[in-house]
Image: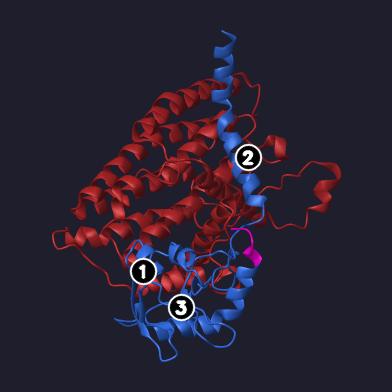
Amino acid sequence: MLDQCFALLWIIGKIICVLVPVIVCVALLTLLERKVIGAMQVRVGPNRNGIAGSLQPICDVLKLLAKELIIPSKASRYLFIIAPVLALAPALAAWAVIPFTNDWVIANVNAGILVVFAMTSLGIYGIIIAGWSSNSKYAFLGALRSVAQVVSYEIAMGFTFVGVLLAAGSMNLREIVLHQSGGIWHWYFLPLFPLFVVYWISAVAETNRAPFDIAEGESEIVAGFHVEYSGIMFGIFFLAEYANMILVSALAALLFMGGWLSPFAGIPYLDHWFSWVPSVLWLVLKMSFFIFLYFWMRATFPRYRYDQIMQLGWKCLIPVALVWIVLVAVAVQMGWIFH
Amino acid sequence: MWNQLKKWVKKLTLWELLKGLRVTLKYGASKDITLQYPEEETPRSNRFRGMLALRRYPNGEERCIACKLCEAVCPACAITIESEVRDDGTRRTTRYDIDVFKCINCGLCEEACPVDSIVLTDEMHYALYNRGENIFTKEKLLMIGDLYESKIAEHREIDRGTC
């Protein structure tokens, strides 16, 4: 009995150790995003609270917490309240199977990649329920768009996963990373480059971020699915969105960029010089690069039109992914690469 | 044929997108041009048309001779002047009101004035807190003129002979 209690506490402790940094990262990212986009628009970004705006996220959260929660009178009350939680829970749950280093993982399951895929897809329920229960035409339109988009891009994303699975021969995220060990040229982003690009584009679309943020579409449908949300309920949607971004970046690092592996492994001197770097730092660096890419893309590209998004998803990404999967499958079967 | 191939290569390598990303990265590395407003301000011309003022001669005599040219030229009808003959035989205003709500800061009154009495200072930071304060009376305008006289004279000196 006591053993079980300890095991439970141990798991809870591990969960806290993963989720607290994630949530802190989300807070930092909101600031970082405004800073990066500001710099790219030749502005400064927030700089009034704390040194260089460092207290801005705290101020934002306090403001959201202090605000009144308004529930529209004709909204479906319970669904309206439950929707932000439904959006956030999968975004956090998927972290259970993400390995940070060789043995830092909450649950080392064999179908890890499937769990992540399922969780990122479940997040859409939060959005669709939020859009439907608000009883507002903008929210409803935003939810519809979001669902259509996620459903289309999930296919392309799934295909890129298939490519990685073929190459690694495993669904366990840890083993996928270990298959890439041995220097930067062993990482999957080189042999699977088209899949890597397709993955990244569909990942951006999957998280409803610019340039695929038609679910929010400020210029057409105000704020999309979360128009009617205020206060911390809105904040939770925000949290979910950013947690998803980090998750997708982590996944990109794990599947294509060798996860926690050092890029210098196998290079005579560099390998030795960088051997002091803790492996989790490599993962964090790779994730930071992808997160920066998110902000960079947001600062650069205008929003896609709805039909263009559908065209890109169905007519470009899926065919490209399919062709490359066939090539990879042939290569693996013939034993040319990925032994 | 060749063009088609070029088009496809460009499409598949995301060439245009990468070009766009390069531009934003370049600007991201460049220096910000933001001015932190309350602490910093953009430079203003000496001809800036801001708050109105009435000037005096160095001996303290008010310049205005109540010719009412400014009242006549004002496109917004913001100026109201009443005048009478003073004891020393000169014509002076008894009332010189400018409604700053009507005023469009065009500067025509300043151009019309034969004695450089009504002028526009370069002051732009002024606010009204109570109803009725929008009427700048003669006393108020003269007071503003007294406060800003050195600046006004300086700015007029720069432009002497140019217009």
Residue, disc 3:
B64
**Chain that bears disc 2:** B
Residue, disc 1:
B71
Q: Is residue A214 above or below residue B57?
A: above
Question: Do circles 1 and 3 both sit on a common chain?
Answer: yes
**Chain that bears disc 3:** B
Residue type at tag 2 = Arg
One can see residue A93 in this view = no
Quadrant for the N terminus of chain B in the image? top right
Mark-to-mark CA distance, 3 and 2: 62 Å
| The one of A25 and B107 positioned closer to us in this rendering | B107
| The one of A320 and A213 positioned closer to us in this rendering | A213
Mark-to-mark CA distance, 1 and 3: 12 Å
Q: Is residue A281 left or right of residue A130?
A: right
Earlier sequence position, callout 1 versus callout 3: 3
**Mark toward the viewer: 3 or 2:** 3
Circles 1 and 2: CB distance less than 8 Å?
no
Instruction: Check residue B55 in the rendering and tell me which mark sits there, or answer none.
Output: none
Q: Is residue B74 above or below residue B57?
A: above
Kindly identify the residue that appears in the image at 52 percent across and 62 percent down.
A31
Q: Is residue A212 left or right of residue A85?
A: right
Residue A255 among magenta residues = no
Earlier sequence position, callout 1 versus callout 2: 2
Rendered hue of chain B is blue
Kindly identify the residue that appears in the image at 36 percent across and 40 percent down.
A150
Which of the 4 image quarters holds residue A118? top left
Instruction: Check residue B22 in the rendering and tell me which mark sits there, or answer none.
Output: 2
